[in-house]
Image (tube, helix red, strand yellow):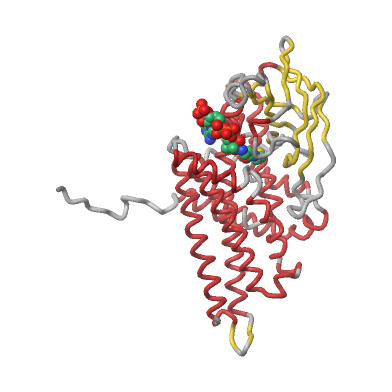
Amino acid sequence: MTAVVSTPDALNFELPEELKLLKRSLREFVEKELWPLTDEVESSDEIPASAIGKMREMGLFGLPFAEEYGGAGIGELGYCVALEEFGRASAAFSNLLGAHCSIGAMALHLDGTKDLKDRYMPQLCSGEKLACFALSEPGAGSDAANISTTARRDGDIYMLAGVKHFITSGDIADFATVFAVTDPALGARGGITAFWVDLNGPGVKRGPKDRKMGLYGSHTCELIFEEAKVPADHVIGKVGSGFITAMKTLDMGRLSLAAGCVGSSQFMLEKSIVYAKERIQFGKPIGKQQAVQFMLADMATEIYAARNMVYHGAWKADRGERFSLEAAMAKRYCSDMAIQVVDRALQIHGGSGFMKETGIERVYRDSRILAIYEGTNEIQRMIIAEELLR
Ligand code: COS
């Protein structure tokens, strides 16, 4: 048998220099520009326009997209590294970015025709226009193939009718990727089509902001289509291939969401370590107590596992391989991990953790949705099991 020599480079866990640089500059941006706004975003339930302007200047709205359209072209790994850093800021900011980049404009980026991309990607990459993703409906959340919004062809246009709900950034987005039924007999396999829709056009209404448990500063609302006219050349991909476009886009969204979980958890761990060293009880720092040490150890271990899952999924995506399984596993694991990590961070901080000042109760509230949106963790388990049993 030939001897197999393993060298340190056989598997490379080092981020490339450009991504280390990106990480550093985003850390600086988050700390300098976004952290000071946290309380304001929380109490006003709005992101100040000036902050969105600064995000535009940083080129954040084009991070995962091609350079030819003004994007940063940093690939899925680069985008995950960026969202990891963004996870340290108020979730309102990562939600704004995620709704636009990870899913809203991602469907167009993945499956749009050249004409459609040439026309819209530059304004999306610059952040001049914002996008959202409209799949969920009152009667079709987890069961995404069961949507009832219809698109009826009438000459050169489609007439869109139906209601989408819980649409992140639906109140501010200029465009949406909207999924509608074009052939009810075919369902997920050929019956659903994705459309690129101007939300400021006639026949489109936006519902009031939903009242939520957390994620202040990021809004969801209904999008109501009443015979909204969409040009036939605004179909994303092919007529009937919309469900596949939705699933491919969600693979991207789920992995990058997982990256945000790693970032927010890392931040919670760092805060907890500082507190464990500073807080004196029974005559010594609480970090000397084994109960606290074990919590910190579990947090660090789980974050380590989570980060490696995300990077591995992103590595597969960047190689052009299908990564639905890795995205589902990462989304399931990292979101549950983030919920547990912030719970431990709050426990370590004791009564102070329950108070607004430490910022932990906000992360606690904001984290709960992670196990629900972009596909509940039960749906992720179904996807994982399906792949295993295929
Ligand atoms: N990439 C490419 N193709 C995919 C795919 C993916 N990630 N996922 C599914 N497909 C294909 C399948 O291969 C199947 O085609 P074939 O039969 O030709 O192989 C087709 O799409 C239908 O898939 P499936 O049979 O799995 O459809 P289901 O109706 O059973 O639904 C789930 C699948 C449950 C996974 C889907 O409805 C889902 O993801 N639901 C959650 C939706 C969600 O995340 N909502 C959040 C709100 S949007 S932010």
Q: Nearer the viewer, residue 208 or 18?
A: 208
Q: What residue occupies the far top of the structure in this picture?
A: 155
Q: What residue occupies the far bottom of the structure in this picture?
A: 283
Q: Nearer the viewer, residue 88 or 374?
A: 374
Q: What residue occupies the far left of the structure in this picture?
A: 1
Quadrant of the displayed image that contains ligand 1: top right
Q: Position of residue 207 (x, y in %)?
A: 83, 37
Q: In the rendered image, which quarter is residue 247 located in?
A: top right
Instruction: Give the residue at x 61% y 64%.
Output: 268
Q: Is residue 181 left or right of residue 289?
A: right
Q: Quadrant of the C terminus?
A: top left
Q: Is residue 86 left or right of residue 22?
A: right
Q: What residue occupies the far right of the structure in this picture?
A: 208
Instruction: Give the residue at x 75% y 55%.
Output: 214
Instruction: Give the residue at x 57% y 61%.
Output: 266
Q: Position of residue 113 (x, y in %)?
A: 59, 21
Q: In the rendered image, which quarter is residue 160 located in?
A: top right
Q: Position of residue 37 (x, y in %)?
A: 75, 57
Instruction: Give the residue at x 59% y 53%.
Output: 335
From the viewer's perspective, is residue 88 above or below residue 295? above
Q: Is residue 126 left or right of residue 244?
A: right
Q: Position of residue 111 (x, y in %)?
A: 57, 27
The answer to whether one can see residue 70 in this image is no
Q: In the rendered image, which quarter is residue 115 located in?
A: top right
From the viewer's perspective, is residue 32 above or below residue 131? below
